[in-house]
Amino acid sequence: MRKLLLPLAASVAAIFSASAIDYNVTGKISGLDGKKMYMFDYDIKKNIDSALISDGTFTFKGSYPRPALVRIENGQHFSNCVIDPAPVVVDFTTHLPSSGSETNMKLNIPKEKEREIDVKIGALRDSIMALQIPEEEKIAIFEPKSKPIIGSYIDWLEDFIVDNPDGVGESAIMTYGNQIFIVTPEKWNALYNRLPAYLKGLEITKHFNKTYSQMAKAAEGKPFIDFMGLTLDGKDAKLSDYVGKGKYVLVDFWASWCGPCRQEAETVLKPLYQKYASHPKFEILGVGVWEDAEQTKAFLDKNLTLWPQIIGTGQEPMNLYGFQAIPMIILFGPDGTILKRQLRGDNLVKAVEEVLK
């Protein structure tokens, strides 16, 4: 078995002697005899143990310095569990423990809560879809009615995180922190101030804390934050070459491999561009993120773009503007002020029409 390797052996020894947790994780998997199953620590993003699969079963036994959330995996087969003294059996269908301590079985609770919320949202959607009114009126009714339902889940998740200062809380933080279209920097800060020391010290928590801090700096009403990239012909380009020059600029942060990005560009941005192509106070700008310039350019060479592009920016714009999911579409005012962010679909169109009317 492979143990966690840390830079300072003395520190490891001290941690293990003080609070090491002995674990025993088992499971069944067919068709993989002779291969290995790996135990992956989500927070440090490393494999910390391995187990040989024999007769369709495997067993991890070892010690670890903390009650971490881990992923038991081989290729597409995976299940999550928490390092815990009690034996754990993982399931590759539900991707959660099928038996174990109260701690490990708690991993199922947020999933059950999510299903409960999904049922409520589905019932609301069905009731509104049955109304004999225009589609845009249905959307206008759905959004305000769905927010309290989703909000109740977010509030419940905050308390669940605080009450579980171990891998269970870590799992819930991963879910909570990624809700950037729902969780505001203010809500994150309020939760962060309530977190137990163990959860506060996790790398994932530090990551989200940085993201939401940056999101606050790039919130609506704040000035734009500049960054560098390249034009399609390889020349240096900056966001400030377009933003803050007296026009309303709709900036689409996207990547060529992102299906929703391509769909948004085709079904929303393209018609919007065609409608306002001759407007003297409006411009659309694409910013390729999360991939190198060659990948973005290769895609655009095959798929003609109608608006200017800045490519080869990597993840810098994502870090500067505090987002982890794309497409991220932001509307900037003539002076470079951030007017609206996280725009999609009809809300995007309405935001542009409102400022150009």
Image (cartoon, rainbow, N blue to C red):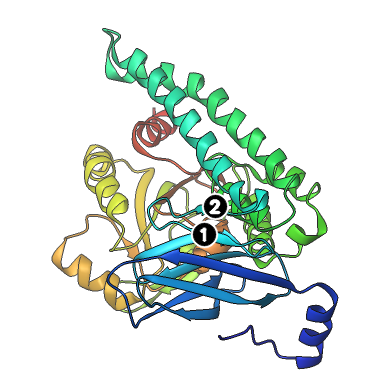
**Is residue 237 at least partly visible in the picture?**
no
Examine the rendered structure and indicate whether residue 344 appears above or below residue 261.
Answer: above
Q: State which tag comes first along the sequence, 2 or 1.
A: 1
Say which of 100 and 177 sits in front.
100
Q: Secondary structure at mark 1?
A: strand
From the viewer's perspective, is 273 left or right of 52? Answer: left
Say which of 157 and 303 sits in front.
157
From the viewer's perspective, is 17 left or right of 225? Answer: right
Examine the rendered structure and indicate whether residue 306 appears above or below residue 132.
Answer: below
Residue designated by label 2: 99
The 10 Å Cα crowd at callout 1, few under 14, some 14 to 19, many 20 or more, is some
Q: Secondary structure at mark 2?
A: strand
User: Residue at left 41%, top 70%?
Assistant: 57
Q: On residue 89, which mark appears?
A: 1
Check the picture and name the quadrant holding the N terminus: bottom right
Q: Amino acid at mark 1?
A: Val
Q: Position of residue 219 (x, y in %)?
A: 61, 46
Q: Position of residue 33 (x, y in %)?
A: 32, 78
Q: Amino acid at mark 2?
A: Ser
The CA distance from mark 2 to mark 1 is 5 Å
**Callouts 2 and 1 close, C-beta under 8 Å:** yes
From the viewer's perspective, is 184 left or right of 194? Answer: left
Say which of 33 and 181 sits in front.
33
